[in-house]
Image (tube, rainbow, N blue to C red):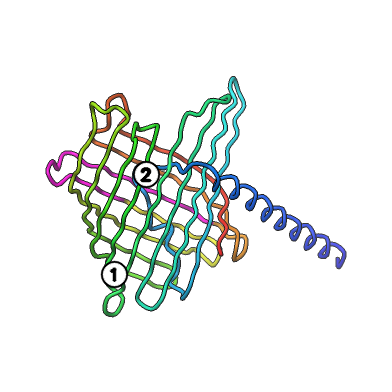
Amino acid sequence: MTSLKFYIKYIRKQFINMLRIYIITIVAFFFISNPLSAQLVNIEKSRKEAKPGFQGHIDLNLMLTQNTRQIFETGTSAHVQYHKERHTVLLLNNISFMRVEGDNLINNGFQHLRYNYTLGKGITTAEIFTQHQYNSIRLLQRRFLLGGGPRFKILENDNLGIYVAPLVMLEHELLNDEDESRTDKFKGDLYLSGTFALNERINFSHTTYYQPDFARFNEFRIASETGLEMKFNDSFSFLVTYNLAYDSHPPQDIPKLFYTLRNGIKYSF
């Protein structure tokens, strides 16, 4: 029995060491690559518990399919947070990439910077954010956002958290087809977010965004993300994420509805 326990402990230690080497190698590869992105960005899943100093995590997902063609898909996001007293700064960089038999099909990325200031007893938080992104599959050459507003804590305890934020933003878009270029727009950025901890190692999260154009309310975007996180230990987790995005007025020949299901590894520090 003692030998069996020692063997299991040894195998677990070697597995963790292999994961660390794998993550460091992949992260180094991605950070020397060009940044890539999605259309609506879920910042809520990247928030960390407000502890003094620096925190962060790195998410990775990989997929290789071989049938009539070889398809390689991968993505990663790096998040860094700094918190001091009532001040919190979030920095997020995301990469997504797909290659089919040596040809690049999808090349997406975004960079997001957000500042939070907690007001009063912590129920309300003032947010200011800016973002840059592009998405080749949706013909988005570049998109710049600048916005802000209040974020309200509806409920928060050890197992459950619910938050809502009625933000506003200025959006500038340029499509790959310049004949359909979108100019500056003043839009809403309303989101509802919830987290639920089943136990110390299993967490569920969900966020829904609604972004209407204030000049034309029939033009809007809706996006939702539902995630499951299963922790191996304090540093490593396994992730399953389902994304759904709807654009009422997409560029020509681009579908209104997109959805993805991904799994990957998360490293927290």
Q: Is residue 230 positioned above or below 123 on the image?
A: above
Residue 116 image point, x, y percent: 33, 67
Q: Is mark 1 on a helix, strand or loop?
A: strand
Relative vertical location of residue 126 with respect to residue 244 in this rendering, above or below: below
- What residue do we see at 61% from left, 47% from top? 26
Report, in whole angstroms, how far the alpha carbon at label 1 lies from the one at label 2: 25 Å
Is there CB contact under 8 Å for labels 1 and 2? no
Badge 1: few (under 14), some or many (20 or more) residues near its Cα, within 10 Å? many
Question: What amino acid is found at the position of numbered circle 1 in the picture?
Answer: Thr
Q: What residue type is labelled 2?
A: Gln
Q: Mark 2 points at which residue?
A: 133
The image quarter in which residue 115 lies: bottom left
Query: Is 210 a magenta residue?
Result: yes
Q: Quadrant of the C terminus?
A: bottom right
Residue 240 rendering spot, x and y as whole percentages: 51, 48
Region of the chain picked out in magenta, as a range: 209-229
Q: Is residue 267 magenta?
A: no
- In the picture, the disc for residue 193 is none
Residue behind mark 1: 125
Up-down relation of residue 177 to residue 61 (above or below): above
Q: Is mark 2 on a helix, strand or loop?
A: strand
